[in-house]
Image (tube, helix red, strand yellow):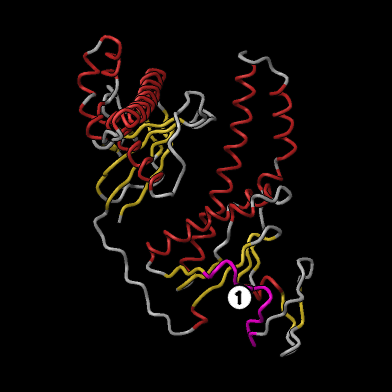
Amino acid sequence: MIKAFKYRIYPTDEQKVLMSKHFGHCRWIYNWGLDTKRKVYTLTGKSPSKFDLSNMLPSMKKQEATVWLKEVNSQSLQATLENLDMAFNAFFNKRSEFPKFKSKNNSKQSFTIPCGVEVDYDHGRVWLPKFKEAVKIKLSRKIVGIITKSTVSKNASGEYYISILANDELELPTKPTLTDKHEVLGIDVGIKDFCTTSEGVVVENPKFLRSTQERLVLLQRKLSHKQKGSKNRKKAQLKVAKLHQTIVNKRTDFLHKLSTRLVRENQAIAREDLNVKGMMQNHKLAKAISEVAWTQFDSMCGYKTEWYGKWYLQIGRFEASSKTGNECGHYYGGLTLDQRTWKCPECGIVYDRDVNAA
């Protein structure tokens, strides 16, 4: 299995300068590769491969205009071209839009290191290629397996992280055979409550964004009053970014703990396949839907069930789960959105719409 281990790193001022060069040079190579592929395709009808572009890098480093490419790790430049190739493949497979040029003003900067990363557990340091000294790292857990690839990133709040992929060379556990429907836990996600399980357990929506809304509005108002390009504006931007990062960290921590607990305690989990992108078109609910992060929760449950050898099932998005009684199967078409409970005319059971859907 291949797992990712993400850690906070604390580079020195000198190391920050070299990391900034890696961010900028890799971004420039990405834009250069994208521009080259577009121009060559326009002239010849064929697009150069990642190998063709990589073979051009040694000659570019000898040219006076681009000799500065020698300052960074050459493998990171090659990995950037590989990421560009993956972006094109995703576009042709209709999984994303056409690749766009990267801006230096992007809030998140990153570069990839294919190999050569070593972790010193005794001294809390990580060795990166092209860096003369090791970078301080906060090791919250030990890396299990062989390091295959690493990515160094910087977020909008100025924090540096390294994400390390490691292969433990173990096979995924075998999933159990399901013999009883009670072995499957149904989950119905919502906005008022984060989710309701088929066992009747209701998980409240923590609403991390709403709880900090007043503070966020205040900081954003102060930011709007600062002069563009001034140092005070950069300080105000940093305060807003740090508050957003705090919200993201709280939400991610909540989702990780909840998804791990549900996966560990159940043999299988079933959830409705929601059209989140379509639901976001409703401007009255878009903010609340984005806050609960259904897609992120769905992704966590998906890969964690694979790790633990459990089942993750999804039913069709057009299934009338709230309107169909789970005991008798009667369809109650008169159920409106404001009705939280309904009585089945077939069997007489009073259903809670969320528990029934789960």
Question: Which of 209 and 83 lies nearest the eye of the viewer?
Answer: 83
Q: Position of residue 88 (x, y in %)?
A: 37, 40
Please give left or right for residue 13 compared with residue 65 in the image. right
Relative to 296, residue 234 above or below: above
Please give left or right for residue 299 compared with residue 19 in the image. right
Q: Quadrant of residue 83?
A: top left
Q: Which residue is mark 1?
A: 199
Q: Position of residue 21 (x, y in %)?
A: 37, 20
Q: Position of residue 139 (x, y in %)?
A: 38, 41
Residue 182 in view in this figure: yes
Q: What residue appears at the point 55 percent right and 43 percent down from the top-left corner?
A: 249
Please name the predominant secondary structure of the magenta segment in the image. Answer: loop
Amino acid type at circle 1 is Glu
Q: Quadrant of residue 168?
A: bottom left
Is 319 magenta? The answer is: yes
Outermost bottom residue: 347
Question: Which of 77 and 39 lies nearest the eye of the viewer?
Answer: 39
Question: Which of 183 and 332 lies nearest the eye of the viewer?
Answer: 332
Q: Position of residue 149 (x, y in %)?
A: 29, 41
Mark 1, secondary structure of its residue: loop
Q: Quadrant of the N terminus?
A: bottom left
How many numbered discs sit on the rendered protein? 1
Residue 128 in view in this figure: no
Q: Residues within 10 Å of mark 1 (few under 14, many from 20)?
A: few
Is 27 magenta? The answer is: no
Outermost right residue: 338
Q: What residue appears at the point 62 percent right and 48 percent down from the top-left corner?
A: 290
Please report the bounds of the magenta region as a residue range. 315-329
Q: Quadrant of the C terminus?
A: bottom right
